[in-house]
Image (tube, rainbow, N blue to C red):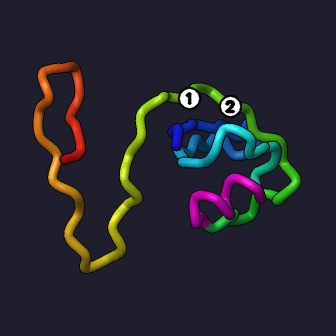
Amino acid sequence: MPTYQYHCTDNDQTLEVIHGMTRAVETWGDLCELADHDPGQTTTDAPVERLMGTGMVMPPKPKPGEAGPKLKSCGCSGACHH
């Protein structure tokens, strides 16, 4: 799934999330739910703006205490999951 960055002008925060291309993220509440992020004092109906999206497929973040995936160079500008 693609990785996207969204910005909330109400609190000047930017979060990165992974979701399917058909998923609509329009509010701070939507974004916080996807990112497992506390909305804090910002109202959940505050609008967010998508900044960018990548075509990279990244494995999910490991849970606390779990080992993450091993990444190694694939000769391109980034690292590949093997």
Residue 37 placement, left or right of 68: right
Circles 2 and 1: CB atoms closer than 8 Å: yes
Which residue, as the protein is rendered here, is positioned at the far front? 82
- Depth check, front residue: 22 or 29: 22
Q: What secondary structure prevails in the magenta region?
A: helix
Q: Amino acid at mark 1?
A: Gly
Point out the stretch of residues depicted in magenta: 29-37
In the figure, 40 relative to 28: above or below?
Answer: below
Q: Secondary structure at mark 1?
A: strand
At a point 68% along the width and 63% down the height, the residue shown is: 33
Q: Position of residue 76 (x, y in %)?
A: 19, 20
- Depth check, front residue: 32 or 9: 32
Q: Residues within 10 Å of mark 2 (few under 14, many from 20)?
A: some
Residue 47 placement, left or right of 1: right
Identify the residue position indicated by label 2 in the image.
Answer: 50
Q: Position of residue 51 (x, y in %)?
A: 62, 27
Q: Amino acid at mark 2?
A: Arg
Give the label on residue 53, or none. Answer: 1
Q: Secondary structure at mark 2?
A: strand
At a point 48% along the width and 29% down the height, the residue shown is: 55
Give the label on residue 44, or none. Answer: none
The nearer-to-camera label among 2 and 1 is: 1
